[in-house]
Image (cartoon, grey):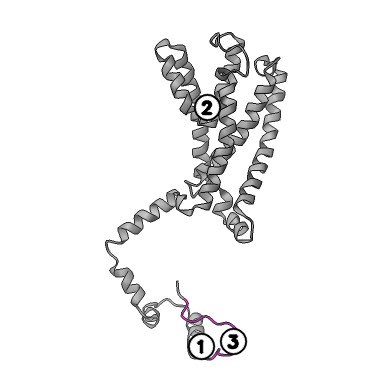
Amino acid sequence: MQEREVKAKHQQLISGVSVLSYWASTYIWDFLSFLFPFSIAIVLFNIFGLDQFIGTGRLLPTIIMFLEYGLAVASSTYCLTFFFSDHTMAQNVVLLINFFTGLILMVISFIMGLIKSTTSANSFLKNFLRLFPGFCFADGLASLALLRQGMKDKTSDAAFDWNVTGASICYLGVESICYFLLTLAIEITPSCKLTLATLKERWSSKSSQLDTSPHLEALLRSSSEDAALDFDEDIDVMTERNRVLSGSCEKAIIYLRNLRK
């Protein structure tokens, strides 16, 4: 996001870097950066003896969910950044989204699963809530903890069962690929980039169509009229402009004439 804001990304693309190469390298770097907190989490699980996550038959699904979560949350964040033009705002909103989907929704789903009247509704809603990588990851870890305490249904007695970590692993794996492909599609298709700034610009352009006479007048006005109206023009700029317009620099290799903005 910040690379796009400071035009570093634009410079790389116009220098010959392909869209796929740019996003693939960013994806790989973010995943490698994720391996450091992932390693710390596994070490802490061992230090505090959390056998529900690293016990017999539990370590492998925990590692798979961690790795897939790192890939899925990175690619989904790429998609969200296209809706923002300021990296600070984007970071705050993404953090709130991940907090809400990874903790709040997981707690709500857990409570609904305990109430018999909402159990079926909870099972149905999980199919949509798992579209958020944060919910998938949190629900998978919570299911491992509940399995150890015997709070899962009798049909789920293994760590890789669908109602334990199977669904989370499958969803996270698919999301890692789909969100990354969606990022490439948005990047390649400029019309899909609906940022807050572009939406505001489109709204202002539509409203400006109601009164275009001042704009047309400015376009039709000659450069001499503009110069006459510009009373604050620097004397050096005026002298250089007069020198160019008078033809004194005909022998120059390159010269700009009547350039305005």
Q: Please, what is the three-letter code of the amino acid marked with disc 1?
A: Arg
> If you read the primary sequence from the N terminus, does the residue marked by circle 2 or circle 1 appear first?
2
252 to 197, vertically: above or below: below
Question: Residue 228, image x and y in percent?
Answer: 37, 81
Q: Image height check: is 38 above or below 181?
A: above
Marks 2 and 3, the one that precedes in the sequence:
2
Mark 3, Cα crowd under 10 Å, few <14 / some 14-19 / many 20+, is: few
Point out residue 152 in the picture as x, y percentages from the top left corner.
55, 11
Under circle 1, the secondary element is helix
Is residue 252 covered in magenta? yes
Q: CA distance from mark 3 to mark 1?
A: 12 Å
Q: Main secondary structure of the magenta part?
A: loop
Magenta stretch holds residue 194: no
Residue 96 point in image, percent of width and height: 49, 34
Give left or right: position of 254 versus 204: right
Rounded to the nearest whole Å, what is the CA distance between mark 2 and mark 3?
66 Å
Which kind of residue does numbered mark 2 sit on? Phe
Q: Is residue 152 above or below residue 212?
A: above
Residue at 43% across, 11% down: 115
Q: Nearer the viewer, residue 175 or 141?
A: 175
The residue wearing badge 2 is 135
Q: Is residue 85 above or below residue 161?
A: below
For the point 51% across and 38% down, which residue is it? 94
Mark 3 vs mark 1: in front: 3
Specify start and end residues of the magenta stretch as a single range: 248-259
Q: Tell me the SS state at disc 3.
A: loop
Q: Residue at x 35, y 59 (%)?
A: 205
| Residue labelled with disc 1 | 243
Read off the residue under disc 3: 252
Q: Which mark is residue 59?
A: none
Q: Is label 3 in contact with label 1 (beta carbons under 8 Å)?
A: no
